[in-house]
Amino acid sequence: AQTFRDFEIRVVDDGSTDPATRARLERIDPARARVLRTGNRGLPAARNHGARHSTGEYLCCLDADDRLHPEWLAKAVAALDRDAGLAFVSHWLHAFGDEEWDWKPTDCGFPALLDVNTVNGAALVRRAAWEAVGGQVETLREGCEDWDFWISLVERGFRGAILPEILFFYRRRADSMSRAMVGERHRQLYHQLIE
């Protein structure tokens, strides 16, 4: 439903064994999207695989249960086209599903980004920046892979911006990956990021 129409869609099936999911993927019109199948290697590996098998100048990683505002790509592409020094653009978001709340970060540089992930995983990033840091670290299968990626970009001198509008809709469920990152698991992931 994007108003910006010059894009390609890559759907990465990360080794799904669910019959309903596999059947739904078989029904995707190849003229609209290309389905890529891999063994189950985790979220960052799936994102890297999708990036390697796409051709666009910009990349946006959208998880299957979330939604983009119809103006997201148009506004993000315009921001990147206006400023050649900008490597990525994020946005505010609205959570829906089991919980409802808005998230409105304002700073995606250091030191703010070292304290908390202020960039959404569906931020639009230049392919050149993605490739310069080698994509996402595939060993971070249990979370924080996107946070690590944004830190890697900023520490190498890349700059990002946050558009102060709700342009993303984040589904919250009882089994959401971000809900699993609590307590000891959260501390372990933080330790990995620090290292």
Image (spheres, grey):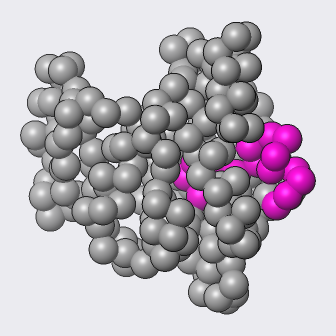
Q: Is residue 152 magenta?
A: no
From the image, give the main secondary structure of the stretch colored magenta: loop
Would residue 23 be visible to someone looking at this image? yes
User: In this rendering, is residue 111 above or below 39?
Assistant: below
Q: Locate residue 30, reporting x and y percent.
A: 13, 58
Q: Locate residue 36, reporting x and y percent.
A: 19, 49
**Residue located 19% across and 57% down the image:** 34
**Residue located 73% across and 62% down the image:** 155
**Residue located 30% across and 74% down the image:** 55
User: In this rendering, is residue 26 above or below 35?
Assistant: above
Q: Is residue 119 magenta?
A: yes
**Residue located 14% across and 54% down the image:** 29
- Quarter of the picture containing the N terminus is bottom left
Q: Which range is magenta?
A: 109-123
Q: Locate residue 140, reporting x and y percent.
A: 51, 34
- Quarter of the picture containing the C terminus is top right
User: In this rendering, is residue 65 above or below 54?
Assistant: above
